[in-house]
Image (cartoon, helix red, strand yellow):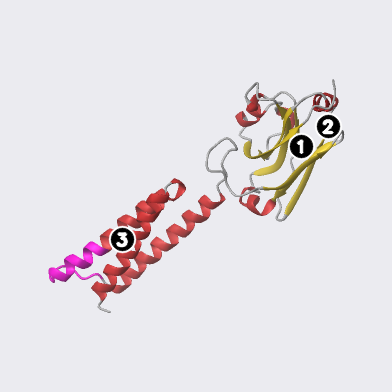
């Protein structure tokens, strides 16, 4: 296949791939723009060079180098954004970070986290969770009946965590109806759970609130 024809088809492939990522949008929009621009430039060059032979010839190694840069850049971009975690109250939630949640009343709340998906954050954060009761009458960030687990090091595989009930939580759990919530947190290594008592305060200290699971509870007493 002549080089200019190959350049045209490579450019077309990149261009249409870029258009696809434009349509998908979200985190892939930037990559879509880059692929579209590069693909369009390659295709236009091939068409123009076919009709204007006086145009400087694009050497094969330059085209291959360009394609390599595009592929490498997109791979780095994809790796970065695939690992990026969103806050629990933002749209487009990420892959499941919690394998399971539950409690053993009146003793403790417990969760099982997916450590493999958290490994990119292990140098800057520890992992913990909040267990709180919420009846919908106030913002979740200000829920007053809340327990925070002691943060742990992030490791690969399953990360099992639990936090013991205190007297206030136990009483409210047995005299309330609504939701019990399990919220996975990434806690900066220089932050201690004694520094906050609500999710809003935690977020102000740069704690990442990354995944929420909720379970309904029934009235336990009068």
Q: Earlier in the sequence, mark 2 or mark 3?
A: 3
Tell me if residue 53 is in the magenta stretch.
yes
* Neighbour tally class for label 2: few under 14, some 14-19, many 20 plus, Cα within 10 Å: many
Picture quadrant where residue 55 is located: bottom left
Residue at (34, 65) in percent of width and height: 13
Residue 8 position within the rendered picture, expressed as x and y whole percent measured from the top left: 26, 68
Which quadrant, please, contains the C terminus? Answer: top right
What is the secondary structure assignment of the residue under circle 2? Answer: loop
Q: Do callouts 1 and 2 mark residues in contact (Cβ within 8 Å)? A: no
- Whether residue 43 is visible, yes or no, is yes
Instruction: Residue under label 1, please give it.
Output: 149
Image vertical order of residue 138 relative to residue 125, above or below:
above
Q: Earlier in the sequence, mark 1 or mark 2?
A: 1
In the rendering, which numbered label is found on residue 111? Answer: none
Q: What is the CA distance from the residue labelled 1 to the residue labelled 2?
A: 10 Å
Residue at (63, 48) in percent of width and height: 96
What is the secondary structure assignment of the residue under circle 1? Answer: loop
Tell me if residue 34 is in the magenta stretch.
no
Q: Which numbered disc, 1 or 2, marks the residue closer to the eye?
A: 2
Residue 201 position within the rendered picture, expressed as x and y whole percent measured from the top left: 65, 26
In the rendering, which numbered label is found on residue 165? Answer: 2
Instruction: Residue under label 3, please give it.
Output: 39
Q: Please state if 51 lies on the left or on the right of 119 as rendered.
A: left
């Amino acid at each position: 296949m002549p080089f200019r024809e190959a350049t045209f088809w490579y450019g077309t492939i990149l261009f249409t791939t870029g258009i696809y990522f434009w349509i998908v949008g979200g985190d892939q929009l930037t990559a879509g723009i880059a692929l579209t621009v590069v693909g369009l430039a390659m295709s236009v060059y091939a068409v123009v060079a076919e009709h204007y032979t006086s145009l400087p010839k694009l050497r094969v190694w330059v085209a291959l180098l360009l394609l390599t840069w595009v592929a490498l850049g997109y791979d780095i971009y994809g790796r970065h954004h695939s690992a990026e975690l969103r806050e629990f109250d933002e749209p487009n939630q990420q892959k499941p970070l919690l394998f399971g949640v539950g409690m053993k009343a009146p003793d403790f709340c417990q969760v099982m986290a997916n450590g493999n998906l958290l490994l990119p954050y292990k140098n800057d954060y520890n992992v913990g969770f909040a267990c709180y009761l919420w009846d919908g009458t106030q913002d979740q960030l200000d829920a007053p009946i809340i327990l925070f687990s002691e943060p742990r090091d992030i490791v690969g595989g399953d990360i099992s965590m639990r936090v013991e009930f205190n007297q206030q939580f136990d009483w409210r759990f047995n005299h309330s109806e609504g939701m019990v919530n399990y919220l996975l947190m990434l806690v900066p290594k220089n932050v201690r759970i004694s520094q906050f008592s609500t999710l809003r305060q935690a977020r102000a200290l740069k704690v990442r609130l990354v995944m929420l699971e909720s379970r309904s509870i029934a009235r336990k007493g009068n």
